Image (spheres, rainbow, N blue to C red):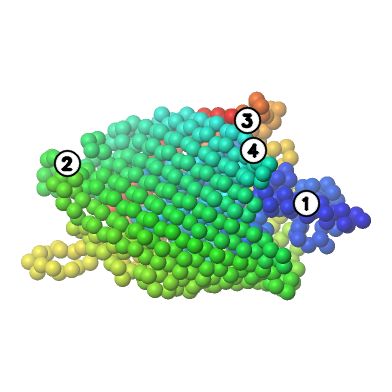
């Protein structure tokens, strides 16, 4: 009788966490034994069961499973953590994750993973999704994570960070990791939220969100938000000071409508960012015209999920995406740097639609098989560059493309303690042909609180439209580019202990081949010219990254929490044996939270530390450590949440490396000057209010 009651209670707890997707809807994030094995739970008391935490992840296998059974090293960042730590953007969320670091060049943020974040890359080696919908754009493959991320951070329920190659399920871009952002639902919101904030650099934000599940079964969420920031008044660069050229403006909308297994979602975002860096040979400190970029994204996603009798499920998805990029680059004449300013204008647009169908079924009680197919058509991959005056067109490229992918995965429960997970995906591209990428993992649970994983994976990154087709007076296109490839090996030990703690230790080795980079090509078009080289993207590099990672996390009923992580990475160019640019050997994270006074107020102190790095030109950037402080409360008044944050509390001065393309014609010397680093923010603050009714 008691054993039956315990099993019933356990199933209810698992359903709470698994169906609602709330990682600690039970209150306490401790994970003792295997919730799927009643024999391990039968001897637990109801008090022990009440503290059970079941963490689940969807993106690792395209179906919900416990993180300890996922064929990857997984980190979940929840809405609770985002709120209490004062994170303003997805890039700040990812910057808190062990092994991750984000580089900001005053225009865009680029996600680095385990020592790999080369200056000049656009982030295409990270697959970024919202509710399983791919966000990497069709021109640059960029994974937008700062104010250009098309979703307000308050709409995030959790972020699934899935390390390692994921091309066996997702194809392109799932190179180093997969990041799946899960949104809040109308049912969980159940009302209206109004939110606003004010912070340093005259930064304002405002958001209005409504969500509800109606008695008829329909569920609705709709949200809109705006951001306006004047940015820094003064930023210092070689030979000039940029004044009032750091502005940032963004507007976003998101909606979700669901009924039973049918979900219709869509979003729109537009962001304009001023560039203070005088990049791409632009005129320094130019206000008329101003150097700026605009990123605009729109998407619609219709999916249907249904579970049939006989333990098999069907998932279908059809979608439409559009991305638009605009940029103005005012530049000086190399021969007359004191002369008039000319402006180059870049326009790029990607329009695509696709369909995905997948089904999964449990065979013979111990095989969970998933099979699926995906097709995408790029209607438009256009790039245009022209001088506004005299109006000469320098580039006018309009291409299209098709991608077909087929995948298969099987999870074989060999024994109650041992799982073998194996998957394979075939992709065929109209640009370069086909590629096959496998993944395999052995997952062993010798004890209820211990998990060991041995993981192997391969992945690819297809050359994007910018790398294939962009050309100018100094560069030429290369439609013969081939995809990049990676082979990855990882061993993971996950441990839970003392009722409140969980830890993870992993060692990893990655081999990357056929890396795409821009290099000088001797074209010899004119024998009388001593230097007539052009630049071209080629598969001309390879790299190795090996290292180890450790993190530990604890939570207590009193409200205390602690999280710490450390990553050591040795990443080097295979040919030269020199360290990769922007690759820190040591990366440390620490976050401690605790209640103040009557527990109505929570404090969070976060430390992020990084060892020295080199720029693309070989200059060494000093190590740094920054401390962030946030006070947060949702109990001072009914329906009111308030937080105040100080970022970079001790005003640490530090820089990030930038692309080797960041050069400009110096107004004093008249020479082309390379910009190695971009200055980062010093001490700043934000105050935020959210009212829910």
**Do the residues under discs 4 and 1 have CB atoms within 8 angstroms?**
no
Gap in angstroms between the C-alphas marked 3 and 1: 29 Å
For label 3, the crowd category at 10 Å Cα-Cα, with few meaning under 14, some 14 to 19 and many 20 or more, is few
Q: Residue furthest front?
A: 216
Element assignment for label 1: helix
At horizontal 65% and vertical 42% (from top left) the residue drawn is 213
Gap in angstroms between the C-alphas marked 3 and 2: 53 Å
Gap in angstroms between the C-alphas marked 1 and 2: 68 Å
Element assignment for label 2: loop
At horizontal 26% and vertical 64% (from top left) the residue drawn is 477
Q: In this view, does 620 lie to the left or right of 335?
A: right
Considering the image in quadrants, where does the C terminus appear?
top right
- Tell me the number on the disc at residue 190: 4
Residue to which mark 3 is pinned = 693
**Do the residues under discs 3 and 2 have CB atoms within 8 angstroms?**
no
In percent of width and height, residue 167 lies at 50, 66
In percent of width and height, residue 247 lies at 35, 36
Nearer-N-terminus badge (3/2): 2
Q: In the rendered view, would you say 436 is above or below 319?
A: below
Nearer-N-terminus badge (2/4): 4
**Do the residues under discs 1 and 2 have CB atoms within 8 angstroms?**
no
Nearer-N-terminus badge (3/4): 4
In percent of width and height, residue 204 lies at 44, 31
Gap in angstroms between the C-alphas marked 2 and 4: 54 Å
Element assignment for label 4: loop
Residue to which mark 2 is pinned = 341
Q: Nearer the viewer, mark 2 or mark 4?
A: 4
Residue to which mark 1 is pinned = 12
Residue 329 shows in the view = yes
Q: Pick the residue in front: 235 or 290.
A: 290
For label 4, the crowd category at 10 Å Cα-Cα, with few meaning under 14, some 14 to 19 and many 20 or more, is some
């Amino acid at each position: 009788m008691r054993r039956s009651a315990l099993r019933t209670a356990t199933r209810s707890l698992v359903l709470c966490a698994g169906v609602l997707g709330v990682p600690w809807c039970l209150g306490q994030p401790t994970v003792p034994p295997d919730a799927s094995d009643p024999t391990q739970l039968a001897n637990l008391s109801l008090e022990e069961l009440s503290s059970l935490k079941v963490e689940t992840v969807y993106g690792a296998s395209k179906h919900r499973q416990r993180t300890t059974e996922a064929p990857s090293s997984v980190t979940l960042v929840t809405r609770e953590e985002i709120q209490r730590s004062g994170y303003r953007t997805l890039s700040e969320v990812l910057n808190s994750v062990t092994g991750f670091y984000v580089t900001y060049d005053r225009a865009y943020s680029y996600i680095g993973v385990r020592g790999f974040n080369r200056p000049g890359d656009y982030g295409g080696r990270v697959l970024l999704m919202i509710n399983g919908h791919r966000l990497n754009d069709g021109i640059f493959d960029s994974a937008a994570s700062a104010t250009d991320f098309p979703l307000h951070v308050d709409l995030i329920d959790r972020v699934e960070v899935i390390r390692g190659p994921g091309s066996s399920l997702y194809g392109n871009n799932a190179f180093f990791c997969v990041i799946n952002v899960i949104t809040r639902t109308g049912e969980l919101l159940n009302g209206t939220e109004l939110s606003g904030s004010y912070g340093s650099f005259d930064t304002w934000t405002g958001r209005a969100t409504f969500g509800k599940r109606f008695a008829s079964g329909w569920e609705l969420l709709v949200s809109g938000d705006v951001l306006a920031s004047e940015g820094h008044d003064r930023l210092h660069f070689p030979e000039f000071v940029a004044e009032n050229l750091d502005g940032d403006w963004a507007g976003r909308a998101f909606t979700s409508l669901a009924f039973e297994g049918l979900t219709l979602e869509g979003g729109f975002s537009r962001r304009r960012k001023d560039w203070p860096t005088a990049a791409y040979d632009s005129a320094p400190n130019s206000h008329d015209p101003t150097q700026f970029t605009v990123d605009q994204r729109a998407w619609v996603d219709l999916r249907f999920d249904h579970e049939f009798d006989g333990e098999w499920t069907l998932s279908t998805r059809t979608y439409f995406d559009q991305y638009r990029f605009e940029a103005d680059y005012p530049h000086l004449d190399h021969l007359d740097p004191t002369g008039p300013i000319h402006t180059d204008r870049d326009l790029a647009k990607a329009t695509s639609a696709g369909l995905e169908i997948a089904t999964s079924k449990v065979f013979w009680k111990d095989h969970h098989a998933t099979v699926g197919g995906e097709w995408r058509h790029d209607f438009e991959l256009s790039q245009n560059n022209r001088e506004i005056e005299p109006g000469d067109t320098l580039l006018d490229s309009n291409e299209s493309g098709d991608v077909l992918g087929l995948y298969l995965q099987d999870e074989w429960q060999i024994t109650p303690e041992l799982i073998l997970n194996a998957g394979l995906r075939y992709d065929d591209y109209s640009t370069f042909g086909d590629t096959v990428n496998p993944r395999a993992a052995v997952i062993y649970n010798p004890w209820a609180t211990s998990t060991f994983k041995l993981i192997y994976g391969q992945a690819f990154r297809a050359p994007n439209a910018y790398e294939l087709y962009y050309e100018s007076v100094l560069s030429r296109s290369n439609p013969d580019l081939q995809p990049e490839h990676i082979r990855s090996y990882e061993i993971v030990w996950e441990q839970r202990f003392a009722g409140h703690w969980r830890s993870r230790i992993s060692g990893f080795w990655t081999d990357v081949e056929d890396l795409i980079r821009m290099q000088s090509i001797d074209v010899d078009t004119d024998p009388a010219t001593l230097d007539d080289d052009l630049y071209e993207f080629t598969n001309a590099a390879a790299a190795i990254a090996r290292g180890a990672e450790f993190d530990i996390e604890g939570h207590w009923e009193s409200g205390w929490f602690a999280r710490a992580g450390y990553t050591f990475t040795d990443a080097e160019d295979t040919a030269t044996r020199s360290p990769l640019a922007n690759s820190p050997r040591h990366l440390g994270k620490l976050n401690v939270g605790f209640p103040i006074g009557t527990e109505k107020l929570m404090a969070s102190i976060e430390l992020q530390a990084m060892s020295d790095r080199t720029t693309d030109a070989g200059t060494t950037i000093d190590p740094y450590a920054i401390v962030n402080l946030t006070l947060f409360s949702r109990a001072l008044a009914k329906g009111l949440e308030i937080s105040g944050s100080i970022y970079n509390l001790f005003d640490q001065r530090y820089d990030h490396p930038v692309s080797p393309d960041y050069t400009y014609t110096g107004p004093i010397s008249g020479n082309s000057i390379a910009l190695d680093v971009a200055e980062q923010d010093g001490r700043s603050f934000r105050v935020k209010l959210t009212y829910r009714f």
